[in-house]
Amino acid sequence: MRKSKALNSKLLMFVIVVFLILTGSFLFLSLSPEPTIIEAQQIECKEDTITTGLFIPDSLSFCGEKVPLQYFDVRESLDRELLINVYFQSQTLGFIKRANRFLPYIDSVLLANDIPIDFRYLPIIESGLLNATSPAGARGFWQFMEATGKDYGLEINSYIDERYNLELATKAACRYLRNSYQILNNWTLVAASYNMGVNGIKRRLDAQKVNSYYDLDLNSETARYVFRILAFKLIIENQKNYFIDLKKEDLYKPIPFELILVDTTITDLTEFALSRGTNYKILTILNPWLLENTLMNKSRKEYVVKIPTPTARNIK
């Protein structure tokens, strides 16, 4: 009899515990979000979804030479560069902002030297319109190697590097492009040769028995090179088609400056800048070709130095 009572008590306790566990589980589940709601929330994330392709015009040219967009490989190569650069927004917006400052001058030099205006996009893809230095040692907007820069009349030493002089480097680039055209007789091939070299392009044309850039099998960098130029031509000339809506005040303005001629050594460019109402920092922003605080000039060569106008730092 005692065993039976003890067994009944244990059974009752077990039932109570099970009841409490089941009741707690039910309450917990009723307070938790339903799995279907969580799944719905995940599915519901539709903002910023890319659902359309990028604009590619029916026809396109480079320097007056037709781009054969009817070829699938050409169209897809262009599409690739558009996708990369349109959606690399921080970089592309920076290019466009700087283009407003520098392209008007570059355009004027290209036109004065009878170089097609589409070459304005070449320094964009070479350097992003920055005085960049490549891993191979190419420098400046136009990315001249030291030997090539010297061949085209640029002074390069421990005090001066005229690859960083926009005016002189742009004129040197025009001479380079003109010389390349006299050999290749095609501006699209000239653009490709700026990356690979004229002899490299000629060898591949001969080996593959074709006469068009768009028919050449090339290394990855040169195969993409002209398409990157074309992509930026389209993006900059048709910004709203690529979801870019910069206001005029967003663009970088040209920095107003005056020119002075220097034909002697300047032992202290800091003092030189201060005596002309500016400072060494702004002097080197306008004249990045000055590498040191001293300008050595034993030969009495005449250099053109930019000095900012009094209100240059206040431009908006």
Image (cartoon, rainbow, N blue to C red):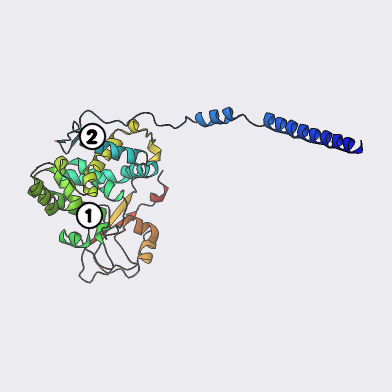
Q: Around disc 2, counting alpha carbons within 10 Å, would you say few (fewer than 14), some (14 to 19), or many (20 or more)?
A: some
The picture places residue 228, in percent across and down from the top left corner, at 26, 42
At 11% across and 43% down in the image, what residue appears?
186
Residue 233 visible somewhere in the drawing: no
User: Label 2 near label 1: C-beta < 8 Å?
Assistant: no
Question: Which amino acid lies under the numbered mark 2 shown in the image of this protein?
Answer: Arg
Which residue corresponds to mark 1? 169
- Find numbered disc 2 in the image and state the secondary structure of the residue it sits on: helix
Q: Nearer the viewer, mark 1 or mark 2?
A: 2
- Quarter of the image holding residue 41? top right
User: Which residue is disc 2 drawn over?
Assistant: 75
Q: Please tell me which of labels 1 and 2 falls first in the chain.
A: 2
Relative horizontal placement of residue 175, taking residue 312 as reference (left or right): left
**Element marked by disc 1:** helix
The picture quadrant where one finds residue 92 is top left
Between 305 and 198, the one nearer to me in the picture: 198
Let me know if residue 11 appears in the view. Answer: yes
Q: Residue furthest right?
A: 1
Query: Disc 1 residue type?
Result: Ala
Across and down, in percent, residue 47 comes to 47, 30
